[in-house]
Amino acid sequence: MPDFVTTTYLILMFIALYFFFFYIFLIIRNKHKIFSYPEPERNYPVTVLIAGYNEEKTIADTVKHVFDSDYQAIKEVIIINDGSTDNTKNIVKKLIKTYPKLKLINNKKNIGKSESLNRGIAVAKGQLIAVIDADSYPEKESIRKLVGFFNDPKVGAATSAVFIRNKQTFLAKIQQIEYIVLAWTRKLLDFIDAVYVTNGPLSMYRKSGLKKVGGFDPNTVTEDIDVTWNLMKHGYKTKMCLSAFVTTTAPSKFKQWWRQRERWGIGGIQAIFKYKKTFMKKGMLGFFVIP
């Protein structure tokens, strides 16, 4: 038994040190490019999709942040109201009078985020599709900063740096530190084409890529992880912009936090089993992300 414990400890220590020095190497090698992003070569038309369920407290502020964007080629913003039982639908209908580019898809019953987003994709007119959570708030420049990555036809998705909006509680403050670390590590993985998740608060996708992979899978609990791996499986690159900021509402109670992390963990396990045949195949997905 002591030999097993010692061996396990040494293996874990080796992995930790390996990744520590691996990330240090990436920082040193790419220190001048960490906050950079490509400028769009043209005004790619963008459709923004916001899927939500019972979002009456946040939806108006989210919509305002989207329309405050400095990117001029936002073609439309589509809200998919997923069978909400609160006042979400009526709030959106009032917002449509203020924002002519705002549209509403109203699901009569709750069908889930993935299916709701797929309904939006089916009618989207933009060449690029930005997906934003209904309780998230992109900064003015964030959408524009993501668009330029799609100058490269091999890029299928680009994601943002997420920060906590409600930082009043101790739990939220701890999560803020975690989110900062996640943002940095994902940016470093960008330099080796290994960004493994495009987050829900703000990510952008090539519409043709989403259609090629069949959209978002309703049979997984973490649609953002799944669609990222699916795009990588089909040969697309995934990118991350550390300068594209978005704030989101984090769980403020331990029970909510636990459920969120439980969902993330289950979703990760689902993804590993779903894409296990790509192990040691299919570029960075099989040779780095899954291992």
Image (cartoon, rainbow, N blue to C red):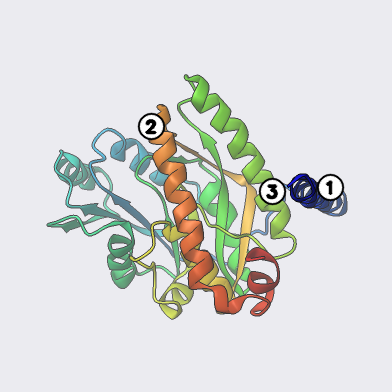
Count of numbered circles on the image: 3
Q: Position of residue 196 (x, y in %)?
A: 60, 60
Q: Which mark is residue 24?
A: 1
| Marks 2 and 1, how far apart at CA | 35 Å
- The three-letter amino acid code for the residue at tag 3 is Thr
| Marks 2 and 3, how far apart at CA | 27 Å
Residue at horizontal 23 percent and vertical 41 percent from the top: 54
Residue 48 lies left or right of residue 180; in this view the side is left
Asked whether residue 68 is in view, the answer is no
Residue at horizontal 44 percent and vertical 46 percent from the top: 262
Within 10 angstroms of label 1, few (less than 14), some, or many (20 or more) residues?
A: few
Nearer-N-terminus badge (2/1):
1
Q: Nearer the viewer, residue 63 or 172?
A: 172
Q: Secondary structure at mark 1?
A: helix
* Quadrant of the snapshot with the C terminus: bottom right
Q: Which mark is residue 255?
A: 2
Q: Is residue 253 above or below residue 204?
A: above
- The three-letter amino acid code for the residue at tag 1 is Ile
